[in-house]
Image: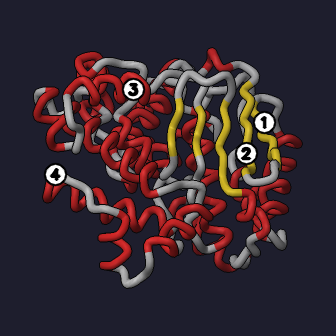
Amino acid sequence: MTSGLLNRYARAMIDSAAAHGYPAEMIGQAVALSPEALREVAGFDSATFCRVSRNVKLMMMDEFCGLTADPCEVGSFVRMCDSAVGANSLGEGLARAFRYYAGVTGDIGFDLHVHPDVASVAMSIARPELDRHRVQVEWWFLIWSRFAGWLIGEEIPLVAVEFPHPCAGPLEEYAEAFSGLSRFSRPSAQLMLPVAYLDRPIVRSREDLRRFIEPQSIDLAQHVEVQRAFRSLLKERLRRQLRAEGALPSIEEVAESWHVSSQTLRRRLDTQFTSYRMLKEEVRREEAARLLREGLPVGEVSLRAGFSESNGLSRALKTWSGMSPSEYHAATRPG
């Protein structure tokens, strides 16, 4: 997972511990970071973030890191996982997990809504003002998407993720973390996935869970070993080609290189609630966001990201993030 979001999540946990009266020296000792590193909280890899998250929770004796009105007992996440692993299908496993949290806390809640084609996980927070960094929804949706993928042994191609707060980081990092379309400043928090995945059988055992939990303790900060979704593989290929050639291939060219017909490729993408056109738009969007964050001129970004004109990029970025290119660069530049 990209370091930018991890750094923000770590900052929220460390700031929360400080706000609850824990001195900087105690926090630094707990997470094995120097005072300088504790102040900066930048450039963390997944292993360092896991240590910060785990040890702040143990120090505070609260798996919610003080971001809710009442603490959540350490060990709750493991017990939730144990309940979910015993289910037969992903839908049943998620329902068990959500019932478990409903029984131990009133501070956050999750509901599974099933529609004809799409299922959604809705999250509610009793006192969102306690989470001034606005990380809880992002972190929990990251947990549910990756834990669900681990349960069934394959990556779940998310349809979309909706956050009630504005974009708080680079668009390409949200794309990497959540794999689907991220929308911001929405009326409610929702994670949407193809409904067919709810019927997937759970392939993990409690012995698998023991090995899964041990290295990360009570956290999930990175992708576990699961089968990659077809959409992710194709998107990765398009991203490499755009960066190398400044243009994207036609669907016929991709199909020929993979020895399938274009109709077959379209059908496979349709089962994952996307299309070749939508994937190309996602790749252009994420590449443009990355280049803008690096400070390149709008004209050069437009050219390298495959836009025909800079005005097209400006309009697209306004739709994606609600910001102009200059506003986006200012909001997402390091430091």
Report which residue position mark 1 lands on.
109
Which residue reaches farthest bottom? Answer: 259
Q: Which mark is residue 24?
A: 3
Q: How is the image coloured?
A: secondary structure
Amino acid at the residue labelled 2: Ser
In the rendered structure, the answer to whether residue 329 lies left or right of residue 206 reads left
Quadrant position of residue 93: bottom right
Report which residue position mark 2 lands on.
120
The C terminus, quarter of image: top left
Within-10-Å neighbours for mark 3: few <14, some 14–19, many 20+? some
Amino acid at the residue labelled 4: Gly
Residue at image point 55% right, 69% down: 268
In depth, the one of 81 and 308 nearer the eye is: 308
Callouts 4 and 2 close, C-beta under 8 Å: no
Amino acid at the residue labelled 3: Ala
Locate residue 215, reporting x and y percent: 50, 66
Q: Is residue 278 above or below residue 335?
A: below
Is residue 93 in sight in this rendering? yes
Q: Earlier in the sequence, mark 3 or mark 1?
A: 3
Q: CA distance from mark 1 to mark 2?
A: 14 Å
Residue at image point 29% right, 26% down: 332
Residue at image point 45% right, 26% down: 167
Within-10-Å neighbours for mark 1: few <14, some 14–19, many 20+? some
